[in-house]
Amino acid sequence: MTTGADPEESLAAGMTLEEALAADIDAGTQPGLRIVIEAVAAAASEIATDVRRASLAGVLGKTGEINIQGEQVEKLDEIGLRRFVEHLTSCGRVVALASEELEETKVLGGPDAEGYIAVFDPIDGSSNIDVAISIGSIFGIYLKPPGEPITNATILRPGREQVAATYVVYGSSTVMVVATAVSVRGFTLDPESRRFLLSHPVIQIPEGTPYYSINEGNYPKWESLMQETVVELRNAHSLRYVGSLVADFHRNLLKGGVFLYPGDRTSPEGKLRLLYEANPLGYVAEKAGGKASNGHTRILDLHPKAVHERSPLIVGNAKAVERIEAILLGS
């Protein structure tokens, strides 16, 4: 039986995703979790090709449809959703799917089915593909409680109950970061073999915080304490903002920094989705030694009330997040 790796253990760079997962995931207590993550990786490999060929294949721009969020659907959103649904359905270990691009939860098994629930944003920042800016995919994975039917309560669970989370960056290279109970590791897609190979054996958020990431164009709409927060960040750190959540988060995870998407006067709850954006990235951050907050409360302790519920998000270096919380709480 696989017992899981020492969290401080550095596995050999170049080993495959499958080999690393075998070291990190206990097949006895988490049967099938490896298969689910491998299904995400298989779909991401295909999407990486779609992204590279997007302008040549005619999949730039919008479909003309409006999703459940009231947002225009990009052609790449549809492609990403289809690829992930196909692989997660065929892997045989996923019993339910919830996504930004699905109006309702997709149930794959009967009431007695056992397995995992995947919540995901198939293509984060898809509008950026038109101008060749990095985009991504975000996944949170939960274990379905044994013997329970799939209901809203099965899906709407606090982020702390995730058993794994992963995201993929489609940029100058395609990188998949996987957080499990024992590790956070990064894998880079080898364009020749089409396999993800271990490139970042141990990921920990650096102690220093050289960067902060926020859309300062929203400054006039923020409450005074958030404005005060950003002024302090501006005076102590360098602004780095791509406008693609996964890309900004990934840079800060590797280089050190904090990402903020607060609420404002027109959107008090912000724009990011708690279930399938904030929670998975919060899980990755915490496993890497960081922190995620809505400005007042730990993100992973929030209990979603709806699949598409929104939440402010402050995530990255733990000390930086705690300092921002202190300002926002007036302490």
Image (cartoon, rainbow, N blue to C red):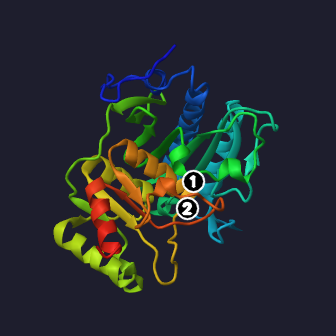
Which three-letter amino acid code belongs to the residue tagged 2?
Answer: Arg
Q: In this rendering, is residue 74 above or below 291?
A: below
* Residue placed furthest toward the front: 331
**Which quarter of the picture shows residue 30?**
top right
* Residue 117 found in image quarter: top right
Circle 2 crowding by C-alpha within 10 Å: few under 14, some 14–19, many from 20 = many
Residue 201 visible from this viewpoint: yes
**Alpha carbons under labels 2 and 1: distance apart:** 9 Å
191 in relation to 78, above or below: above
| Label 2 or label 1, whichever comes before in sequence order | 1
Q: Residue 70's x, y, as percent?
A: 66, 72
User: If the image is split into quadrants, where does the C terminus sit?
Assistant: bottom left
Residue 86 lies, in percent from the top left, at 69, 39
Residue holding disc 2: 273
- Viewer-side residue, 178 vs 81: 178
Residue type for callout 1: Asp
Q: Residue at 71%, 43% (x, y): give it.
A: 96
Q: Which mark is residue 22?
A: none
**Residue 20, image quadrant:** top left
Q: Which residue is mark 1?
A: 121
Q: Residue at x 78, y 37 (%)?
A: 109
Say above or below: 284 vs 69: above
Residue 138 in view (yes/no)? no
